[in-house]
Amino acid sequence: MGKIVASGGISFNDEEGLKVFQKIVDLCTAENPKVLYVPTAGHDNYDDFDDLKKQFSDLGCKEYDVLVLTDESLTYGEMKNKILSADIIFAGGGNLKFLMDVWNRTGATEVFKEAYEKGIVLSGSSSGGMCWFERGYDDCGGENAEFMFIDCLGLI
């Protein structure tokens, strides 16, 4: 059975955030876990990657990678390998509808489900935390920022 740590908006640089990251690492059985950051909800902007790396590094993680699913040159095989070779996956926050549209279009949805079955720790914050549930409720409606329900992975 898979393991999921879903949180609301957390900071990569404070004591409360550290407690969430500690729980994520504690659930991982790998020694020196490999972390995969998936910033899709933030339109694949990963400017905060160094802060995320520091948080996980301080907890004993040694390898880090980023999965940029909007990269048109990324093959399905490369995507699948990145996801299934990780010990911990952390999905960042942002636009839940955009995240699910990209994940469904690229086939990542099914690979994340496979990762769950494999026992890889799935985690995330805000939209990156909601994506693991059956449905999420987010203000990703464009200019008016209207709230809407979004069908998600359905693991919870």
Image: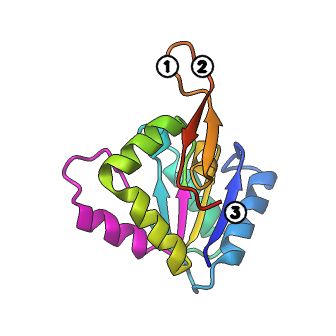
Badge 3 crowding class, 10 Å Cα cut-off, few under 14, some 14 to 19, many 20 or more, is many
Q: Amino acid at mark 3?
A: Phe
The residue that mark 2 highlights is 146
Question: Within the image, what quadrant is residue 132 found in?
Answer: bottom right
Find residue 78 and report its horizontal and vertical position in percent: 26, 66
Residue marked by disc 1: 142
Report which quarter residue 75 is drawn in: bottom left
Q: Secondary structure at mark 3?
A: helix
Residue drawn 71% across the image and 46% down it? 10
Which residue is the site of mark 3? 21
Question: At 63% from the left edge and 25% from the top edge, which residue is drawn?
Answer: 147
Q: Nearer the viewer, residue 113 or 78?
A: 113
Looking at the image, is 73 positioned above or below residue 47? below
Residue at mark 2 to residue at mark 3: CA–CA distance: 31 Å
Is residue 66 in view from this perspective? no
Q: Are marks 2 and 1 in contact (CB under 8 Å)?
A: yes
Residue sitting farthest toward the left: 73
Residue lying at the far top in this picture: please name it: 144
Crowd tier of the residue under label 2, counting other residues whose Cα lies within 10 Å: few below 14, some 14–19, many 20 or above: few
Q: Secondary structure at mark 2?
A: loop
Q: Mark 3 or mark 2, which is nearer the start of the sequence?
A: 3
Q: Which residues are magenta?
A: 65-90
